[in-house]
Amino acid sequence: MSKAGVRVVDLTHPLDENMPIWPGDPEYKLVSQASYGKDGYLTHRMAVGEHSGTHWGTPNTFIKGGRSADMFTPEELVVPAVVIDIRAMACRDRDYCLTVRAVTAWERENGRIPMGCVVILFTGWQEKWHDSRAFFGMDDDNANAMHWPGFGRDAVNHMIRGRGIAGLGTDTHGADPGNDEEFKASSAIYVADGMVLECLTGLDRLPATGATLVIGGLPVTKGTGSPARVLALLT
């Protein structure tokens, strides 16, 4: 959609009962509380995990005493974004981990990552959204093993120290590779007081640079994030 010279790209998956849910997280439920016939209006009771669907995560997810969702200012939720396309690497290795060398190579082609931006990994996993087993990369012989590409801790620390990034984004269910049970990249950005956006979609419609994100994360008091409507503005 275009408006006043600005193109709006929706990076959000709709919430529904068939979406991939992180193992152990609560199921998504939408239950009618009032109906047109009985009450003259329609309303629902919704149950959903903070980190389900397209969502944002805040530092208190892993860091005790870290900022919660209600502590982020509106200005922090309108940020520039860059997109690092790793689809080719992810196709060859579903456990691919972004390295400092890969970041340097991206900058040679696209310019320096700007301070205060969200760095998004375009892995191609958005195409697997409607197949939970494929989206989580589950092995047939080990239901607990998960595989998808993600950020490496060294690359994240490099971008924090040298570029002052505000957060990480990805079209998978985690900023870390799925086989990283220590969540090293997520921990690094949370220690730096940044945010994480996960389960994004529509990344094929974004340029490598030049997008501005509008992150509709809910200001949940003491929350570790929430489902979010994430929009990209292109001029």
Image: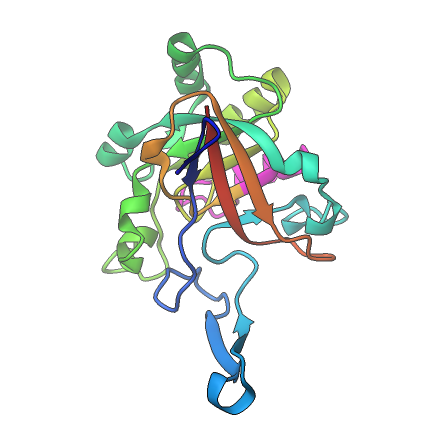
Q: Kindly identify the residue that appears in the image at 40 percent across and 16 percent down.
A: 106
Residue 79 is drawn in which quadrant? top right
**What span is colored magenta in the figure?**
176-196
Q: Is residue 193 visible?
A: no
Q: Kindly identify the residue that appears in the image at 75 percent across and 46 percent down.
A: 71
Magenta includes 21?
A: no
Is residue 196 positioned above or below 88 on the image? Answer: below
Closer to us: 205 or 40: 40
Closer to us: 36 or 143: 36
Q: Is residue 132 visible?
A: yes
Magenta includes 182?
A: yes
Q: State left or right for residue 101 relative to residue 92.
A: right
Q: Kindly identify the residue that appears in the image at 56 percent across and 38 percent down.
A: 214
Residue at the bottom extreme of this rendering: 38
Where residue 162 appears, as percent x and y from the top left, is: 60, 15
- The image's colouring method is rainbow
Closer to us: 26 or 18: 18
Where residue 104 appears, as percent x and y from the top left, is: 44, 13
Q: Kindly identify the residue that appears in the image at 30 percent across and 38 percent down.
A: 124
Q: State left or right for residue 54 relative to residue 161.
A: left
Q: Quadrant of the N terminus?
A: top left
Where residue 152 appears, as percent x and y from the top left, is: 47, 31
